[in-house]
Amino acid sequence: MDGVEIGATEFYTQLAASTELATTSAVPMGQFIEAFKPYLDEGREVFYLGFTSGLSATVEFAFQAQKAMGNPENLRIMDTKIISMALTLMVLEVCKKS
């Protein structure tokens, strides 16, 4: 069901009924470019805190997008090396300081 959005209740209902394990995929480089570009074009600072590269390729695609855009000075990407609540707390702390 790639590309289909469903709510949590439907997800868990389908997960319980399925004989296959659920899978995820990394955000592609092009999607990062689409997300970052409007802010960068406005001259705004973009700071992306990525989910640990030890468990996901997502942050690597963010770095590839940065390179493809010519390494803009107002884009900073960080491989946090952390997951879950620890990442949430880091994001909240960054928000307080901005």
Image: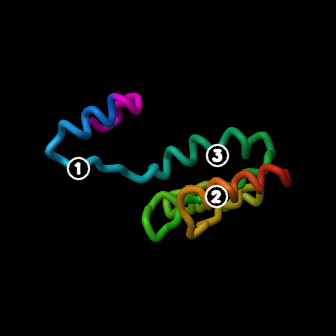
- Which residue corresponds to mark 1? 21
Residue 77: x and y, percent? 65, 61
The earlier-in-sequence mark between 3 and 1 is 1
The kind of secondary structure element at disc 3 is helix
Screen quadrant of the N terminus: top left
Residue 37 is marked as none
What's the CA distance linking mark 2 and mark 1?
28 Å
What's the CA distance linking mark 3 and mark 1?
32 Å
The kind of secondary structure element at disc 2 is strand
Residue 36 is marked as 3
Question: Image quadrant of residue 90?
Answer: bottom right
Three-letter amino acid code at the position of disc 1: Leu
Residue 24: x and y, percent? 35, 50
- Which residue corresponds to mark 2? 49
Q: Is residue 1 above or below residue 48?
A: above
Dot 1, how many residues are within 10 Å of its Cα: few (below 14), some (14-19), or many (20+)? few
- Left or right, residue 92 beside residue 81: right
Q: Please report the bounds of the magenta region as a residue range.
A: 1-9
**Closest to the observer: 41 or 28?**
28
